[in-house]
Image (cartoon, helix red, strand yellow):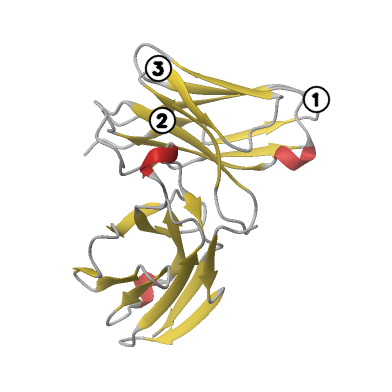
Amino acid sequence: QQQVKQSPQSLIVQKGGISIINCAYENTAFDYFPWYQQFPGKGPALLIAIRPDVSEKKEGRFTISFNKSAKQFSLHIMDSQPGDSATYFCAASATNAGNMLTFGGGTRLMVKP
Amino acid sequence: AAGVIQSPRHLIKEKRETATLKCYPIPRHDTVYWYQQGPGQDPQFLISFYEKMQSDKGSIPDRFSAQQFSDYHSELNMSSLELGDSALYFCASSFRQGRGTDTQYFGPGTRLTVL
């Protein structure tokens, strides 16, 4: 059973547009929710992360929205650029369960010029 | 800033051979995690170490073992390799030191191909 479900699997956005990726989780013990960006053949790079005590976090063009009651969180990429084209993974971990990351299935984003 | 170092970057082995993957965490990081990523899949947690002791185990086959050494580097040993072991193997490191949730930084990965 996939503990973190991510959608969509792929996304095409025009340059300057907003990219939105959604994730939902089952395990209420999760207390840390990072987003990673991965380019082909490279390691995941941390983009931004949030903890459940806040509903939104913004860093530059990247914003996480978090809805604890719905057990959902999303990544918004504002003013999307062709260089943002990559695979994005949401993830979750629980402090009382070893902190290992459980990843969503990934979203392949393509930003068209 | 120093990042996580993994070696080798690429490895080709035959079925039933053994392989050793190495991970050098970011300086002063005390925790290492190993993940396996199959083609087109998300990374899956294998095993972790905190302060040189095994911390947690995930979906790691019995054919695999790992350890963390006194200098905090870690090695993943894989024996009786199977075709299905072909994947990207990532190491991530973090600074936990009893603080609870830690931020994990990933290395560039080792691409293992089993022929």
Q: CA distance from mark 3 to mark 1?
A: 29 Å
The answer to whether marks 2 and 1 mark residues whose Cβ atoms lie closer than 8 Å is no
The amino acid on which the numbered mark 3 sits, given as a three-letter code, is Lys
Name the subunit of mark 1. B
Which mark is drawn over residue B52?
3
Residue B75, percent from left and from top? 51, 22
- Element marked by disc 2: strand
**Mark 1 — residue?**
B16
The quadrant in which the C terminus of chain A is found is: bottom left
Discs 3, 2: same chain: yes
Discs 3, 1: same chain: yes
- Element marked by disc 3: loop
Q: Nearer the viewer, residue A31 or A86?
A: A31
Q: Residue at image x 28%, y 80%?
A: A78
Name the subunit of mark 2. B
The answer to whether marks 3 and 1 mark residues whose Cβ atoms lie closer than 8 Å is no
Q: Residue at image x 31%, y 59%?
A: A47
Q: Residue at image x 65%, y 57%?
A: A1
Classed neighbour count for the residue bearing mark 3: other residues with Cα under 10 Å, few (<14), some (14–19), many (≥20): some
Q: Residue at image x 38%, y 72%?
A: A74
In the drawing, does residue A47 fall left or right of residue B46? Answer: left
The amino acid on which the numbered mark 1 sits, given as a three-letter code, is Arg
Classed neighbour count for the residue bearing mark 1: other residues with Cα under 10 Å, few (<14), some (14–19), many (≥20): some
Q: Quadrant of residue A112?
A: bottom left
**Mark 2 — residue?**
B32
Discs 2, 1: same chain: yes
